[in-house]
Image: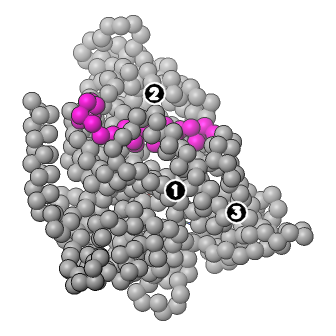
Amino acid sequence: LGSWLDEARIAVRSLAEAAAGALDPTIRLGVTGLSRAGKTVFLTALVQALVNGGRLPAFRAYAQGRVAGARLAPQPDDAIPRFEVESHMRALTGPDRRWPESTRRISELRVVVDFEAASFFGGSRAPRRLTLDIVDYPGEWLLDLALLSQDFRQWSERTIATAEQPTRAPIAADWRAHLATLDPLAPEDEDAARTASALFTGYLRAGRDDRVALSTLPPGRFLMPGDLEGSPALTFAPLVLPGEGDAPSGSLWAMMERRYEAYRTHVVKPFFRDHFSRLDRQVVLVDALAALNAGPEAVADLENALTDVLAAFRHGRNSWISSLFRPRVDRLLFAATKADHLHHTSHDRLEAILRRLVGRAIERAEFGGAAVDVVALAAVRATREASARRGREELPVIVGAPEKGERSNGQIFDGEEEIAVFPGDLPADPEVALRAGGYRGRAASEEGGDLRFVKFRPPLLKHGERPPQLPHIRLDRTLEFLIGDALA
Ligand code: GDP
């Protein structure tokens, strides 16, 4: 009965929203991606482009001069924190040019866009208004959907088996060693639970390191706790229970199982019911370059994550998901971020690689319903292109200022000095890139130097440009896919 009531509530809400939006549309746009994928930077740049404009030729309504203006407005949900776009923008464009604080929880922002509908007959164009509610949330939370179909025993078994894979085994060793000392039938023990959960979280966190770059590491709140940090619902870890039977109440197993259930009931389900089910469109940001850097296992893990993401957006009445909520997303965009780490000749290749990955994930998830597209973008372009001589060859390079304190080959950068990097080629054949993992950047000045992980500072903006406009790659195409039809 509970889930039926939830469905009815969602249906009534959707009807009310549809009636209100018949003429002046309202779109609820989700922005997600794993931590460091680039959500905060993306959303800041997107809002900035809407409000301040910029070079946006592929964003048709804007290029045709039909966008009269856009402004921020009070958000509709009083219980969701506001996305602090102003302070993020100050960080990016202020005198010390910093990347903003990353997403750690859900937040929301409303942008109102006044536009003129396109007119086919040359008559007067009606003034219209698009209300865009943008919800930014950690991708880690989305991947928790998989937990809803696994009980504690199944989840424990799968998690322990996955931790045996070659890249995971070394980083899981400390947690596994502690796990081996635990007796699931012993009396419940808060200290043991806390130690196990801390070691398990340490393993998940190590999986997000640049060198490993794994994507599927649920439970998501262990990495992105939001405001639940330290609560019992996050203080559990997998256990091994031999045999078929149940463990007695009062045992360590029973305690961990209870907390796992609390996590599913009080954390995962409410997120899907209250936030996820209300989205109309979704952009999923993917740091595909990080996975390609780390190698084939990271790429395979990314593909698993994309499959899980698609499963969450799958339409249809028969899936067990629809007993909890009915996804209503009609447009889904996967975006490979930080394309400014590549020369423009490789942007299409990066897009092709992501398209191949998403295509395979679509098959595996038996996904149907929403329109899906793929783009390679840089929300904020931190580099520019040039060419440099290597031996007798003239080669394309990218130029930017590494962040203060970044190191490469014994050199420590001061944050001001610019360097040129051979960005490395992505293979033209996406299959080759996916099999090999494949992208290596090198400092033009230091043959063989490994600059894969150099972080560039945000770009120096044109002096005196007011309001400031951020350089980007394909942000306009992204806007066109996400909201272009609503401005037609
Ligand atoms: P979030 O955790 O998904 O919110 O990720 P952020 O938006 O905070 O981005 C994480 C980091 O990635 C930033 O601090 C930047 O170093 C880098 N980054 C994000 N977007 C871009 C981009 O468009 N270009 C470049 N060069 N770096 C970016």
| Proximity of marks 3 and 1: CB atoms separated by less than 8 Å | no
The residues colored magenta run 296-322
Circle 1 Cα neighbour tier, 10 Å, few/some/many (<14 / 14–19 / ≥20): many
**Residue in the image at 42% along x and 30% along y:** 196
Task: Indicate which disc residue 336 carries.
Answer: 1
User: Is residue 389 at least partly visible in the picture?
Assistant: yes
Q: What SS does tag 3 mark?
A: loop
Quadrant containing the N terminus is top left
- Give the numbered dot on residue 412: none
Cα gap from disc 3 to disc 2, whole angstroms: 36 Å
Amino acid at circle 1: Ala
Q: Which residue is mark 3?
A: 423
Q: Position of residue 480 (x, y in %)?
A: 40, 67
Q: Give, as a three-letter code, the residue at label 2.
A: Thr
| Callout 2 secondary element | helix
Give percent across and percent down for residue 434. Answer: 63, 43
Q: Amino acid at mark 3?
A: Pro
- Left or right side of 297 for 391: right
- Residue in front for this viewpoint, 187 or 1: 1
Q: Which of pointers 2 and 1 indicates the residue nearer the eye?
A: 1
Look at the image and say whether residue 314 sits in the magenta stretch: yes
Residue 69 spot, x, y in % from top left: 29, 82
Residue at mark 3: C-beta within 8 A of ligand 1: no
Residue drawn at the location 44% of the way across and 54% of the way down: 373
Q: What residue is shown with label 2?
A: 159
Query: Mark 3, mark 2: which one is toward the viewer?
Result: 3
Q: Earlier in the sequence, mark 3 or mark 2?
A: 2
Q: Is mark 2 within 8 Å of ligand 1?
A: no
Nearer to the camera, 306 or 365:
365
Compared with 113, 365 (above or below) is: above
